[in-house]
């Protein structure tokens, strides 16, 4: 019998997370996809994640439940223009966020995720090298601000996180009389990140919530996609955790692509009756894209263990 493994990102609906063998952020899911020994991987996430799983585990059949599950960081990046931009910076190391197509990864020296991007870029600068960063402009702007880098940046954004804004946050903060905190994903705009008490990946934010030990009645605003609020409320039902607003009265910011993973779509994919198989990447493209991903995985193992 074929071993079918279902993976779900934190941004999928709670009921999808409950159907999964493994729930995690993009780094955790990539590692799991590589090592889980599955014959079939049903990836309840978005297309670049399923492609990454295929690249890391080419022997497995990888199914994305809905072919429309893309990501604005991918669709806003023209790979021909990216290649030209890369060639205009021959002396730079090209670090790309994992939210990118296989063709994009193949034009990169390193892949990073929001979990390891700070340490990975710091280690490249420590070797005296210069970095260009793509595709997320907000993440790059934050890194330049936070560490005083001068990285040339590609200009794409996450259409979900880019909606968080200081005006809506100020209004929400003013309406709260308890202590207040803001935690944010680095895909959010710089003014939001500058205001945050913690900036990190989805797993990083979840850990911050799990270990929160300050005012028990504090209001914690979370500037990221709404799926992970489920995991946060489960981990700490005692805390007042709210999604950051994007305009007055709207705690409603959610990724349309992640939410295409419906129960029916995931079940069809698990039965082998639906979804799209990631079978269109050539071996040459997968080899070229795997190199910078493997570099990142090696770095993460060396750095974090
Ligand atoms: P993570 O790397 O934190 O899982 O984020 C992926 C993503 O798509 C964020 O919008
Ligand atoms: Fe892409 Fe944003 Fe959706 Fe993440 S939340 S998958 S970055 S569109």
Image (spheres, rainbow, N blue to C red):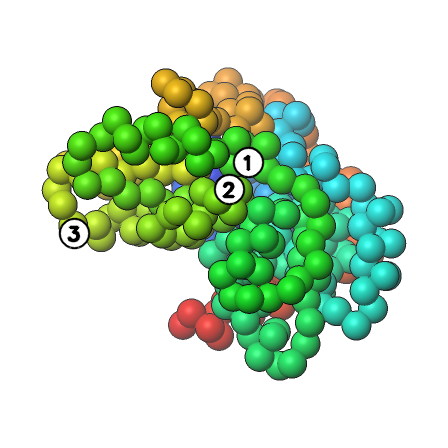
Q: Calculate the distance from the C-alpha at mark 2 to the C-alpha at mark 1.
A: 5 Å
Residue drawn 52% across the image and 31% down it: 163
- Mark sitting on residue 102: none
N-term-proximal mark, 1 vs 3: 1
Estimate the spatial distance between the alpha carbons at disc 3 and disc 2, rounded to whole Å. Answer: 25 Å
> With respect to residue 13, does 62 lie above or below?
below
Question: According to the image, label 2 marks what residue?
Answer: 188
Q: Which of the 4 quarters of the picture holds residue 96?
A: bottom right
Element assignment for label 1: helix
Q: CA distance from mark 1 to mark 3?
A: 29 Å
Q: On the picture, is 128 further left or further right than 2?
A: right
Tell me the mark number nearer the camera, choosing from 3 and 2: 2
Query: Which comes sooner in the sequence, label 3 or label 2?
Result: 2
Q: Position of residue 179 (x, y in %)?
A: 19, 41
**Residue 263 higher or lower than 53, as above or below:** above
User: Residue placed at 45% from the left, 42% from the top?
Assistant: 192
Residue 162 located left or right of residue 304? right
Q: Position of residue 72 (x, y in %)?
A: 65, 34
Q: Nearer the viewer, residue 67 or 2?
A: 67
Q: Position of residue 101 (x, y in %)?
A: 71, 45
Q: Would residue 117 appear left or right of 246 to someone viewing this image? A: right
Q: Nearer the viewer, mark 1 or mark 3?
A: 1
Pointers 3 and 2 in contact (C-beta within 8 Å) = no
Residue that label 3 marks? 213
> In what element is the residue under mark 3?
loop
**Quarter of the figure that contains the C terminus:** bottom left
Q: Mark 2 and mark 1 in contact? Answer it, CB < 8 Å.
A: yes
Q: Secondary structure at mark 2?
A: loop
Residue, x 85% and y 61% (percent of image)? 88
Residue, disc 1: 162
Whether residue 181 is visible, yes or no, is yes
């Amino acid at each position: 019998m074929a071993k079918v493994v279902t993976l779900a990102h934190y941004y999928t609906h709670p009921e999808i997370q409950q159907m999964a063998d493994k729930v995690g952020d993009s780094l955790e899911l990539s590692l799991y996809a590589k090592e889980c020994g599955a014959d079939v991987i049903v990836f309840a996430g978005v297309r670049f994640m399923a492609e990454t799983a295929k690249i890391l585990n080419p022997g497995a059949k990888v199914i994305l439940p809905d072919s429309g599950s893309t990501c604005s960081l991918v669709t806003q990046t023209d790979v021909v223009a990216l290649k030209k931009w890369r060639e205009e910076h021959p002396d730079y190391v090209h670090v790309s966020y994992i939210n990118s197509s296989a063709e994009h990864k193949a034009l990169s020296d390193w892949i990073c995720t929001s979990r390891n991007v700070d340490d990975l870029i710091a280690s490249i600068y420590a070797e005296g090298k210069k970095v260009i960063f793509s595709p997320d402009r907000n993440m790059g702007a934050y890194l330049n601000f936070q560490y005083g880098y001068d990285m040339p940046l590609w200009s794409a954004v996450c259409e979900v996180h880019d909606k968080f804004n200081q005006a809506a946050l100020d209004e929400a903060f003013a309406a709260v009389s308890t202590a207040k905190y803001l935690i944010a994903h680095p895909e959010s705009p710089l003014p939001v990140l500058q205001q945050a008490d913690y900036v990190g990946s989805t797993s990083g934010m979840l850990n911050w919530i799990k270990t929160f030990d300050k005012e028990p009645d504090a209001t914690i605003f979370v500037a990221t996609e709404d799926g992970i609020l489920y995991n946060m409320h489960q981990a700490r039902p005692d805390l007042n955790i709210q999604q950051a607003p994007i305009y007055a009265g709207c705690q409603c910011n959610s990724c349309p692509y992640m939410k295409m993973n419906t129960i029916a779509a995931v079940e069809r994919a698990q039965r082998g009756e639906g979804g799209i198989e990631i079978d269109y990447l050539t071996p040459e493209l997968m080899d070229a894209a795997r190199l910078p991903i493997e570099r990142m995985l090696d770095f993460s193992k060396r750095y974090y263990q």
